[in-house]
Image (tube, helix red, strand yellow):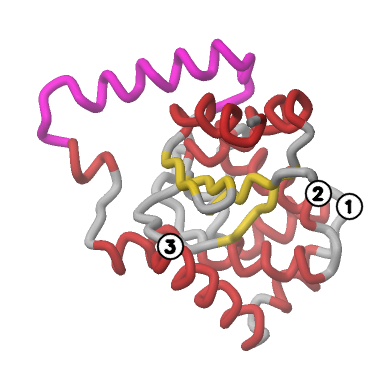
């Protein structure tokens, strides 16, 4: 039976981008499938009283510098030379996360995710600007206006809220988080453990 890696995901996390780029290798080596679960990181933080690393560790001497070092090591290890930290960070991802729900419902998840991640973490686009989002999606051959219009659908809005609440109920406190069966793994530095679990 094929095992599944559930990925609790928000475009606003640079580590979600880095993890997404590393997951195809894991899937290829293990035969696992990856199931993306769109959740709102801000909602997770609010529900769990968590904060971003910049807020939580900003006054800890050396901590953020070390985090940047670990990111550089990860980028080099996986050959992710296209990665660029978004100059507009933090970006409000509500619109593009609702868009992801809409993309999943209309069968265009893969090209939508590829386009938005590249815009966010390679091209440095301001992805909380609806006009920018439409341009990015259109350039990828998607119906940008249609997907943005779908973000106003109450069912789309409700699905994102429900996903976020369900993730918190499972113990999620941040992104990227992965599940293999009932086992939870947090952070891109746990991907080796994810691979071990899914390959067992």
Tag of residue 141: 1
> How far across and how far down the image is residue 157, in percent?
58, 80
Most distant residue in the bottom direction: 154
Q: Nearer the viewer, mark 1 or mark 3?
A: 3
User: Dot 3 surroundings within 10 Å: few (below 14), some, or many (20 or more)?
Assistant: few
Above or below residue 153? Residue 3 is: above
Instruction: Identify the image quadrant of residue 196.
Output: top right
Tell me whether the residue at label 1 lies in contact with that at label 3, contact meaning CB atoms closer than 8 angstroms. Answer: no
Along the horizontal axis of the image, is 145 left or right of 168? right
For the point 58% across and 46% down, the residue is: 180
> How far across and how far down the image is residue 116, in percent?
67, 48
- Mark nearer the N terminus (1 vs 3): 1
Between the residue at mark 1 and the residue at mark 3, the CA separation in whole angstroms equals 36 Å
Look at the magenta stretch and give its main secondary structure: helix
Viewer-closest of 142 and 2: 2
The C terminus lies in quadrant: top right
Between the residue at mark 2 and the residue at mark 3, the CA separation in whole angstroms equals 28 Å
* Residue at the spot of label 2: 111
Along the horizontal axis of the image, is 181 left or right of 110? left
Tell me whether the residue at label 1 lies in contact with that at label 2, contact meaning CB atoms closer than 8 angstroms. Answer: yes
Q: Is residue 9 visible?
A: no
* Residue at the spot of label 3: 170
Between the residue at mark 1 and the residue at mark 2, the CA separation in whole angstroms equals 9 Å
Secondary structure under badge 2?
A: helix
User: Dot 1 surroundings within 10 Å: few (below 14), some, or many (20 or more)?
Assistant: few
Secondary structure under badge 3?
A: loop
């Amino acid at each position: 039976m094929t095992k599944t890696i559930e990925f609790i995901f928000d475009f606003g996390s640079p580590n979600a981008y880095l993890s997404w780029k590393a997951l195809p290798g894991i899937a290829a080596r293990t035969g696992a499938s990856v199931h993306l679960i769109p959740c709102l990181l801000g909602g997770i933080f609010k529900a769990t009283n968590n904060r971003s690393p910049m807020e939580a560790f900003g006054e800890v001497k050396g901590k953020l510098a070390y985090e940047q070092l670990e990111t550089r090591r990860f980028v080099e290890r996986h050959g992710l030379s296209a990665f660029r930290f978004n100059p507009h960070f933090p970006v409000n991802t509500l619109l593009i996360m609702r868009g992801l729900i809409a993309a999943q419902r209309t069968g265009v998840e893969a090209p939508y995710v590829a386009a938005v991640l590249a815009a966010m973490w390679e091209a440095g686009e301001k992805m909380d600007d609806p006009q920018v989002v439409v341009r990015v999606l259109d350039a990828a051959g998607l119906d940008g206006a249609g997907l943005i219009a779908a973000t106003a659908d109450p069912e789309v809005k409700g699905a994102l809220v429900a996903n976020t609440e369900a993730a918190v109920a499972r113990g999620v406190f941040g992104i990227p988080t992965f599940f293999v069966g009932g086992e939870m793994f947090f952070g891109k530095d746990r991907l080796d453990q994810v691979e071990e679990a899914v390959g067992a």
